[in-house]
């Protein structure tokens, strides 16, 4: 089930973010992600529109998506649950209300690049993330025009 974020989710979402970030971004020192956990807790989650995937049997959050207007700021799934369609469901839940979504993804994060391409995102521009010095792609998805 996908539902809006509530304050009680904060610690679980920060843990999901940290676990998934360490797995997907092993090319960035672990210390970087651990130092960013407080910012995730106090700056990034409160500033975004966040939706949570809650496990239907346990009620435990297993993933989340954070949007800042039409920018996909975060999409993270518990590593042991990746590949089960949770990320696709979260993405679909925000696509229905938008004509366009942009995001940035590290070029070395090949699994995420494949996922976003499969979801219809197109690479627009390569740039360097100032915080890490890593190359990243700015990607964009546009809703198809429907003629009636």
Image (cartoon, rainbow, N blue to C red):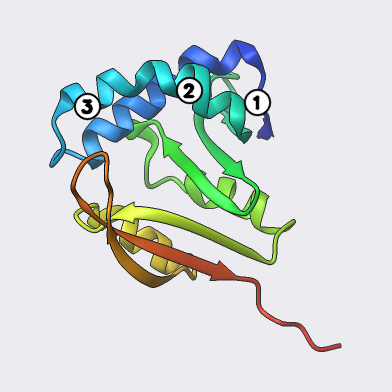
CA–CA distance in space, label 2 to label 3: 18 Å
Q: Position of residue 104 (x, y in %)?
A: 39, 54
Mark 1 burial class by Cα count in 10 Å: few <14, some 14-19, many 20+? many
Under circle 3, the secondary element is: helix
Q: Position of residue 3 (x, y in %)?
A: 69, 32
Left or right placement of residue 77 versus residue 132 in this view: right
Query: In which quadrant is the C terminus drawn?
Result: bottom right
Left or right placement of residue 79 versus residue 65 in this view: left
**Which residue is located at x 60 percent, y 19 percent?**
59
**Which residue is located at x 42 percent, y 61 percent?**
116
Under circle 1, the secondary element is: loop
Q: Position of residue 98 (x, y in %)?
A: 70, 60
Residue at mark 3: 32
Q: Vertically, is 112 above or below 90?
A: below
Residue at mark 2: 13
Q: Earlier in the sequence, mark 1 or mark 3?
A: 1
Which is nearer the eye, 79 or 131?
Answer: 131
Residue at mark 1: 5
Which is nearer the eye, 31 or 60?
Answer: 31
């Amino acid at each position: 089930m996908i539902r809006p974020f509530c304050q009680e989710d904060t610690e679980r979402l920060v843990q999901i973010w940290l676990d998934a970030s360490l797995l997907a971004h092993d090319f960035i020192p672990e210390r970087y992600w651990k130092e960013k956990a407080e910012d995730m807790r106090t700056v990034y989650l409160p500033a975004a529109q966040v939706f949570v995937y809650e496990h239907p049997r346990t009620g435990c959050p297993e993933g989340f998506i954070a949007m800042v207007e039409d920018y996909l700021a975060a999409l993270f799934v518990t590593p042991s649950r990746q590949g089960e369609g949770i990320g696709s469901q979260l993405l679909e839940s925000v696509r229905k209300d938008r004509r366009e979504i942009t995001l940035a993804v590290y070029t070395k994060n090949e699994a995420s690049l494949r996922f976003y391409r499969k979801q219809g995102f197109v690479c627009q521009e390569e740039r360097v993330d100032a915080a890490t010095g890593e190359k990243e792609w700015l990607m964009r998805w546009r809703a198809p025009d429907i003629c009636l």
